[in-house]
Amino acid sequence: MKCEDAGQVCDKSQYKEASFWEKLKLNVHLLYCSPCREYKQKNVKLSIVLKRSKLKTMSLGDKKDLKKQIHQEIDK
């Protein structure tokens, strides 16, 4: 597995989108590739920080209203 592929599978695995075989190949790759192990560790830490931050997103309706306001201002 190439490092680029390992990074993609690592991301997929984090969101529970990777297949069993992808995870298996990733784990084998991680045994001998320290840069990819470091990438995985940083990814896990980032996910933990984001979960703890309790970020809230704007509702779809609010987004549409904001977009409308922006377009109105641009059209002036």
Image (tube, helix red, strand yellow):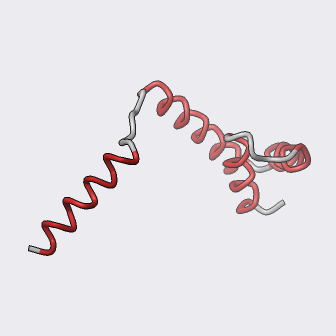
Query: What residue appears at the point 13 percent right and 66 percent down from the top-left corner?
Result: 73
Measured along the vertical axis of the image, is residue 45 above or below residue 18?
above
Question: In this orientation, which residue lies closer to the viewer: 22 or 59?
Answer: 59
Q: Nearer the viewer, residue 13 or 34?
A: 13
Indicate the quadrant where residue 72 lies. bottom left
- Is 48 left, or right, of 29 in this rendering? left
> In which quadrant is the N terminus drawn?
bottom right
Please give the name of the residue rendered at 59% of the width and 41% of the height, measured from the top-left corner.
Answer: 43
Res 31 quadrant in image: top right
Q: Position of residue 59 (x, y in %)?
A: 38, 42
Number of numbered discs on residues:
0
Establish if 2 lies above or below 75: above
The quarter of the rendered structure image containing the C terminus is bottom left
Coordinates of residue 9 in the picture (x, y in percent) = 75, 52
**Left or right of 43, for residue 70:** left
Answer left or right for 25 relative to 14.
Answer: right
Q: Residue at x 67, y 48 (%)?
A: 11
**For the view shown, which residue lies furthest in the left direction?**
76
